[in-house]
């Protein structure tokens, strides 16, 4: 059973805050089953929340209002700044696309935010990744590495992830290696007839997490190193990344377990900024060849639950530290398929990566969500694999004269 509670805001807030508010509400409490913003003119006046039975509605209301007051209303509403838009328009989108993928056994649902892919989807994703990897190596001379799945907790701490994105964290643990602990655990397991939260006291290791993105592995790889001032590096990798998406998980758009093709630029400030710019231009040209409709805009990361959340978002947007490539999946909705980021010397300083004897290394990165990219591709080009091949040949250079 569920019950609905209407929250009337003390003061209406700008409709411009809707996106930032919507992407936080499910993280406020697991008891929120569904929600809907109540809008009037250009403002938000309230929120309708559907709560699990037994939930204290006033407690949920206090939590939501606290987030609104501490993270939302203090943000400055900045108009979106689009830096690129595709020439293509008028794409015909299919209804219930994910259901059709399931019917054709191209994908299988394995759990919350987890999807198994069949051969056809694997082939499409591999081809899209090969294009990006080829671009990275041929145009930028990148070196490729393959990283382990797990990442150390200390690495994420150095990256500032715990302070900025606690809602996405996914920990890895194990039973404390002691014979008495194993015996106690087995007794608890037998008496409880299965796994439950009782096992947590038996687990004392919090040294590793599932990585939320691939570039953190690269900074860890080069920590405590010194590089010649004239030496610039481009590193690329493909790997699994993990972010807890709460109830936001949806089809192939927001998976807990997904793949990222990452490109990291390391060197002088001028090299990193110019490389990011060139990679953006090359990416736009590639997606134009693939006939994909979308745009690229100034963006910010999903900071949450921190006193300086609003300041971080404002700083990112004003300095244009992050751009997002957004591709259409319906006539009126896009998803972020790639991001282009500039970190200045933050990671160089955090990981003690030097350029010369005194200067911190400047870094930037580009990340492509392979499942999202494939989903946008199918959303726009349909399920005809013969047509896929024709389109993909354009990306591999088949359309060049």
Image: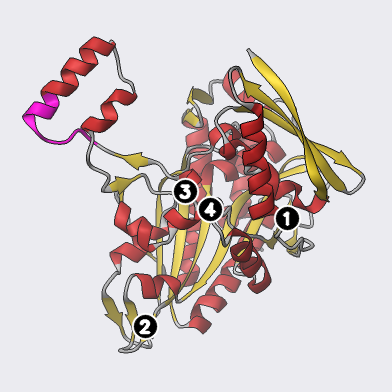
Kindly identify which residue carries mark 4: 368
Q: Position of residue 219 (x, y in %)?
A: 35, 65
Q: Tell me whether circle 2 and circle 4 mark residues in contact (CB < 8 Å).
A: no
Name the residue furthest right.
41
Q: Quadrant of the image for the N terminus?
A: top right
Total numbered circles: 4
Q: Tell me whether circle 3 and circle 4 mark residues in contact (CB < 8 Å).
A: no
Q: Secondary structure at mark 2?
A: loop
Kindly identify which residue carries mark 1: 73
Kindly identify which residue carries mark 3: 166
Q: Within the image, what quadrant is residue 74 found in?
A: bottom right
Say which residue appears at 31% left-offset and 63% top-offset: 220
Q: Distance between the Cα atoms at labels 1 and 2?
A: 44 Å
Q: Distance between the Cα atoms at labels 3 and 4?
A: 22 Å
Q: Secondary structure at mark 1?
A: loop
What stretch of residues is rendered in magenta? Answer: 174-182
Q: Distance between the Cα atoms at labels 1 and 4?
A: 31 Å
Q: Mark 1 or mark 2: which comes first in sequence? A: 1
Q: Distance between the Cα atoms at labels 2 and 4?
A: 26 Å
Who is closer to the viewer here, 36 or 232?
Answer: 36
Q: Residues within 10 Å of mark 4 (few under 14, many from 20)?
A: many
Q: Secondary structure at mark 3?
A: helix
Q: Tell me whether circle 1 and circle 4 mark residues in contact (CB < 8 Å).
A: no
Q: Is residue 109 left or right of residue 209?
A: right
Circle on res. 50: none
Q: Within the image, what quadrant is residue 348 found in?
A: bottom left
Q: Mark 3 or mark 4: which comes first in sequence? A: 3
Circle on res. 231: 2
Q: Mark 1 or mark 4: which comes first in sequence? A: 1
């Amino acid at each position: 059973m569920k019950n609905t509670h209407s929250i009337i805001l003390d003061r209406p807030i700008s409709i411009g805050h809707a996106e930032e508010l919507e992407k936080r509400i499910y993280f406020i409490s697991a008891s929120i089953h569904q929600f809907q913003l109540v809008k009037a003119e250009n403002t938000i006046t309230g929120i309708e929340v559907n709560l699990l039975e037994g939930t204290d509605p006033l407690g949920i209301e206090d939590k939501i209002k606290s987030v609104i007051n501490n993270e939302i209303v203090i943000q400055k509403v900045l108009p979106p700044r689009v830096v690129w838009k595709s020439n293509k328009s008028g794409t015909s989108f299919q209804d219930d696309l994910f259901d059709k993928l399931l019917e054709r056994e191209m994908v299988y649902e394995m759990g919350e935010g987890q999807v198994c892919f069949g051969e056809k989807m694997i082939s499409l994703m591999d081809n899209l990744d090969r294009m990006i990897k080829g671009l990275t190596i041929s145009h930028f001379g990148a070196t490729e590495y393959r990283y382990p799945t797990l990442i150390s907790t200390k690495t994420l701490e150095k990256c500032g992830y715990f302070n900025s994105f606690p809602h996405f964290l996914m920990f890895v643990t194990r039973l404390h290696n002691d014979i008495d602990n194993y015996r106690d655990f087995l007794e608890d397991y037998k008496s409880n007839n299965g796994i439950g939260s009782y096992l947590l006291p038996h687990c004392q290791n919090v040294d590793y997490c599932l990585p939320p993105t691939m570039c953190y592995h690269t900074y860890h790889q080069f920590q405590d190193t010194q590089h010649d001032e004239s030496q610039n590096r481009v590193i690329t990798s493909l790997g699994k990344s993990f972010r807890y998406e709460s109830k936001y998980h949806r089809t192939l758009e927001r998976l807990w377990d997904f793949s990222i093709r990452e490109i990291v630029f390391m060197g002088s400030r001028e090299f990193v900024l110019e490389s990011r710019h060139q990679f953006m231009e090359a990416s736009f040209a590639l997606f134009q060849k693939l006939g994909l409709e979308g745009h690229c805009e100034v963006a910010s990361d999903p900071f949450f639950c921190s006193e300086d959340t609003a300041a971080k978002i404002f700083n990112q947007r004003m300095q244009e530290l992050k751009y997002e490539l957004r591709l259409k999946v319906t006539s009126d909705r896009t998803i972020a398929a790639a991001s282009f980021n500039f970190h200045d010397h933050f990671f160089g300083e955090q990981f003690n990566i030097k350029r010369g004897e005194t200067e911190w290394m400047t870094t930037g990165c580009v990340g492509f969500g392979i499942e999202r990219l494939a989903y946008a591709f199918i959303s726009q080009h349909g399920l005809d694999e013969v047509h896929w091949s024709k389109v993909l040949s354009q990306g591999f250079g088949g359309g060049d004269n």
